[in-house]
Amino acid sequence: MTFNPQAYAGTRAENEKLLLTQLQHLIEGEPYRIANLANASALLRGYLADINWVGFYLLDGDSGGLALGPFQGLPACVRIPMGKGVCGTSAARRETLRVPDVHAFPGHIACDAASRSEIVVPLFDAAGELIGVLDIDSPLPDRFSEDDQRLLERFNALLAQYL
C-alpha cells in the first residue's frame, strides 16, 4: 500500500477518521514492529499541532522499566524507571495521563525544557499486556483535551492490532 498524505482540512471527526485510516494503511501487513512504531510517530507528528515531541517508550523486560523507542523530535531520555515521571507513572498505572503543566507533576523527568504539557497513553498487546507507552509533549500549557485523549487511545488500540 502506498501512503497518500492528505491535508487534514475537514471537521475534527473527518480528520480523526482520516488519521486512523492512514495508520491502518501504513501498518497493515507489515510485521516489523519498529517500522510500524516509527511510521505511527511520524503520522502523529504531521497530524497534531503545537507539539514538540511524539514517540514511544517500550517495556524493557530486563530492567522492568521503559526504553526509548521510535520517535519524532529532539533526542530524548533513553530509560525511564517504572513509576517515575509521567511515562513511568502511566505505564505503572496502565492508564492515560494528561498533564496540563509538567512542571507541577511530582517527579517529572524533563527531557526537553520547552515542554509545558504532556499526554501519555499506554500501549497494550492483544492479550492486554503492556507493550509500552505513547508519549506526546507540547510547548503549550494544557495542550491536550479529552477529545485528544479519546483519539490517541483509539490510535493505540488500532496500532496494537499490528504489533
Image (cartoon, rainbow, N blue to C red):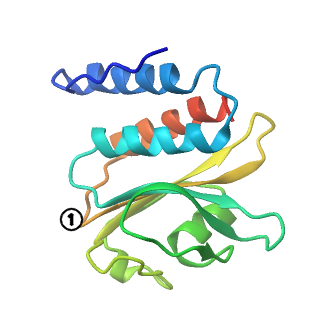
Nearer the observer, 65 or 146: 65
Q: At x 15% / y 24%, what residue is drawn? A: 9
User: Which quadrant of the structure image shows residue 83?
Assistant: bottom right
Q: Give percent across and percent down for residue 131.
A: 71, 50
Image-quadrant location for residue 43: top left
| Image spot of residue 86 (x, y percent) | 51, 70
Given the image, on which type of amino acid does mark 1 rest? Leu
Q: Residue furthest bottom?
A: 107
The image shows residue 66 at horizontal and vertical percentages of 66, 67
Image vertical order of residue 30 relative to residue 72, above or below: above
Q: Considering only vertical position in the picture, is 74 above or below 157?
A: below
Toward which corner of the image does residue 37 lie, by quadrant? top right
Q: Secondary structure at mark 1?
A: loop
Q: Residue furthest left?
A: 9
Q: Examine the rendered structure and indicate whether residue 5 appears above or below residue 143.
A: above
Quarter occupied by the C terminus: top right
Q: Which residue is under mark 1?
A: 140
Q: Residues within 10 Å of mark 1 (few under 14, many from 20)?
A: some
Is 112 displayed left or right of 129 in the figure? left
Q: Which residue shows up at 43% across the image and 79% down it?
A: 105
Q: Residue 13: where, in percent of width, then height? A: 29, 22
Residue at 29% x, 40% y is: 46
How many numbered dots are placed on residues in this image?
A: 1
Q: Is residue 65 left or right of residue 80?
A: right
In front of the other: 121 or 134: 134
Which residue sits furthest top?
Answer: 1
